[in-house]
Image (cartoon, grey):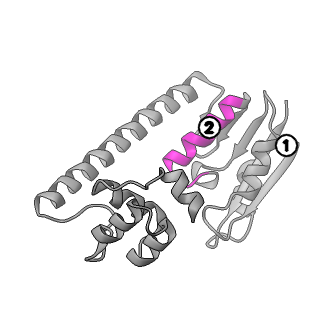
Amino acid sequence: MSRYGYIRLDEAEVQLSRQALQLDTIGGFDRLFVEHQAVIDQWEQRNRLLNGLQSGDVIYTAAADRICNSLKDFLDFVQALEKIGADLVLLEEGLDTRTAAGQKSLRLLNSFQQLNHKAQSTRKKAGIAKARKKGRRIGRPPVSIPPDFRNICRLWSLGEISGREAMRRSGLKQTSFYKKAAELGYKPSGGKQADENKN
């Protein structure tokens, strides 16, 4: 079993002192990882620590916001530790995943995360429904087709022009062309594969 200390420094905190003093109360670390995080979502040292963990190892850090950016990030990180069989101790929060109290706290946090996810999903669906009711289109704008698209599709379907030529004339990319042509009931004379090979 190994004991690891983890410190993350952001732009507002350039010195180790506060976090180092907190970790000094524990001491006896096999290794100390220091994250100089210029970009919020880059976790080079945390990933290095995670990749080197073994069952029974314990990570100590000053607080939850020193090792994660959000509740979801925290729970995902703890889940990764659980798969390895490693544990986490947050000094400021007094959370130790080795204890029954720590496990109870994690279950509570998971419940809040699920509640938050459901609330966000409900708000999003309500917003979409409201926008549609007002006549606003949701999603990508429809692909515009030229006025003579039916004639282009007819020529392509009869084999008089290739798929590549039909796409050039219509100004559509391959996926959009085949989809729009199919919606109008047009198919390549020898099947789609044959048409593609012909190009």
Q: Tell me what residue is drawn at x 25 percent, y 49 percent.
A: 125
> Residue at the left extreme?
134
Q: Secondary structure at mark 1?
A: loop
> Where is mark 2, residue-wise?
78
Compared with 62, 14 (above or below) is below
Q: How many marks?
A: 2
Check the image and name the residue furthest to the top.
100
Identify which amino acid the numbered label 1 is placed on.
Answer: Phe
Front-lying residue, 164 or 36: 164
Query: Where residue 13 sits: x, y (%)?
Result: 65, 69
Q: Quadrant of the C terminus?
A: bottom right
Q: Which residues are magenta?
A: 68-83
Q: Which residue is at 62% across, 24% downward?
A: 99
**Distance CA(mark 2)–CA(mark 1):** 20 Å
**Circle 1 crowding by C-alpha within 10 Å: few under 14, some 14–19, many from 20:** some
Against 52, residue 149 (above or below) is below
Whether residue 80 appears in magenta in the rendering, the answer is: yes
Q: Which mark is residue 29?
A: 1
Residue 94 in percent (x, y) is at 59, 38
| Residue 198: quarter of image | bottom right
Mark 2 Cα shell of 10 Å, populated few (<14), some (14-19), many (≥20): some
Place of residue 139 in the rendered image (x, y in percent of width and height, measured from the top left): 31, 61
